[in-house]
Image (cartoon, rainbow, N blue to C red):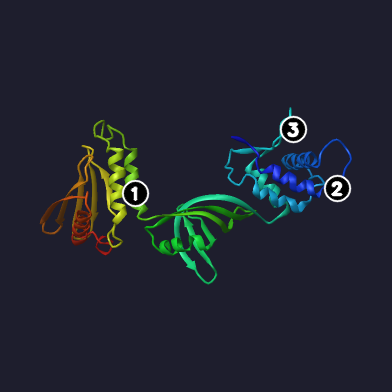
């Protein structure tokens, strides 16, 4: 994908202010634009950069193409009738590192907040893929960071800017523009896997759960899911029902939601004796969601029992 460079004219304006007075038909902006183009072209061709371009201005490329991903590029607005140079993520990085030890990239990550250092106004964020980011604790996000810190089941979505070194190792997460809390996201993710199931999933038979049913049930449980309860195993049944199961050393507890319904048949069986308990609960009201969670907790569904 090639996009026109909206930030490059700003760099051209900055460069224009540093150009010596020249006599000719070109305006200072035209000269600066062409000089910026030469810089990009020279770096792309592994040639020395033009002497007229101040090396300290290479840092301004941090403001261009921060959102570019591999395979994407941004094109310098060219003079009429000619093509402009194309800036890729690799070329952008090389230009910035030509005059600096670090470069800036936009990041959009999901993960957990592991620790917070209030005295140093910072916190540690680990993405779901394992990268660790040290981030600045700014006032607008402080309350959310406090709420999510150390809570494994609360994930966060972070959008901001990361400072990276030449080895692409992140040094700091700065200028966080968005931090969104995702309580009990692990439950929602477990349900999301059901959305990939198609009719005929069981040896040519088996009905897929309704996408609306999956979304509604996942949201209802995640909204109030107690921290002391273990996370359930989530599966689809051949008739399109959704099945949840909690297994502890001594008891097996399950909940089956018939297709497109919030009515659950709760079933608990003591493994040693075979003694069973059954209860029907409709999760459409707050009172019954409490009954649902109480049944699971009393029948081996707590974190310690399921560990």
3 on left or right of 54:
left
Name the mark on residue 20: 2
Residue at mark 1 to residue at mark 3: CA–CA distance: 51 Å
As drawn, 129 above or below 78:
below
Q: Name the residue under label 1.
A: 188
Percent across and percent down for residue 159 are 51, 51
Q: Which of marks 3 and 2 is nearer the N terminus?
A: 2
Tag 3: Cα neighbours inside 10 Å, few (<14), some, or many (≥20)?
Answer: few
- Looking at the image, which is closer to me, 274 or 297? 297
167 on left or right of 43:
left
Residue occupying image coordinates x 74% and y 45%:
13
Q: Residue furthest right?
A: 23
Tag 1: Cα neighbours inside 10 Å, few (<14), some, or many (≥20)?
Answer: many
Q: Which of marks 1 and 3 is nearer the N terminus?
A: 3
Q: Tell me the mark number nearer the camera, choosing from 1 and 2.
A: 2
As drawn, 176 above or below 79:
below
Residue 172 location, quadrant? bottom right
Name the mark on residue 62: none
Q: Mark 3 points at which residue?
A: 79
Location of the C terminus by quadrant is: bottom left
Q: Is mark 1 on a helix, strand or loop?
A: helix
């Amino acid at each position: 994908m090639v996009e026109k460079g909206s930030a490059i004219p700003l760099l051209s304006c900055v460069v224009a202010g540093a150009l010596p007075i020249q006599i000719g038909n070109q305006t200072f902006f035209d000269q600066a634009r062409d000089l910026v183009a030469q810089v990009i072209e020279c770096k792309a061709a592994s040639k020395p950069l033009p002497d007229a371009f101040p090396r300290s201005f290479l840092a301004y490329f941090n403001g261009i193409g921060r959102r570019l991903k591999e395979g994407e590029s941004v094109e310098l607005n060219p003079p009429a009738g000619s093509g402009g140079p194309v800036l890729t993520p690799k070329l952008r990085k090389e230009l910035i590192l030509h005059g600096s030890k670090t470069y800036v990239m936009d990041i959009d990550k999901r993960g957990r907040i592991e620790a917070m250092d209030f005295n140093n106004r910072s916190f540690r964020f680990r993405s779901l893929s394992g990268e660790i980011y040290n981030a600045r604790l700014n006032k607008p996000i402080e309350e959310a960071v406090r709420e999510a810190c150390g809570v494994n089941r609360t994930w966060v979505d972070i959008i901001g800017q990361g400072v990276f070194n030449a080895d692409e190792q992140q040094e700091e997460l700065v200028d966080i523009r968005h931090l969104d809390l995702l309580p009990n996201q692990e439950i929602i993710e477990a349900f999301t896997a059901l959305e990939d199931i198609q009719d005929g999933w069981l040896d040519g038979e088996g009905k897929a759960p309704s996408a609306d049913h999956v979304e509604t049930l996942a949201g209802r449980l995640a909204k109030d899911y107690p921290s002391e309860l273990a996370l359930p195993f989530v599966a689809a049944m051949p008739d399109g029902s959704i099945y949840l199961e909690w297994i502890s050393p001594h008891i097996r507890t399950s909940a089956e939601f018939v297709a497109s319904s919030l009515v659950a048949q709760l079933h608990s069986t003591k493994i040693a004796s075979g003694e069973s308990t059954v209860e029907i609960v409709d999760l459409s009201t707050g009172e019954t969601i409490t009954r649902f969670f109480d049944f699971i907790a009393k029948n081996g569904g707590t974190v310690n029992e399921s560990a």
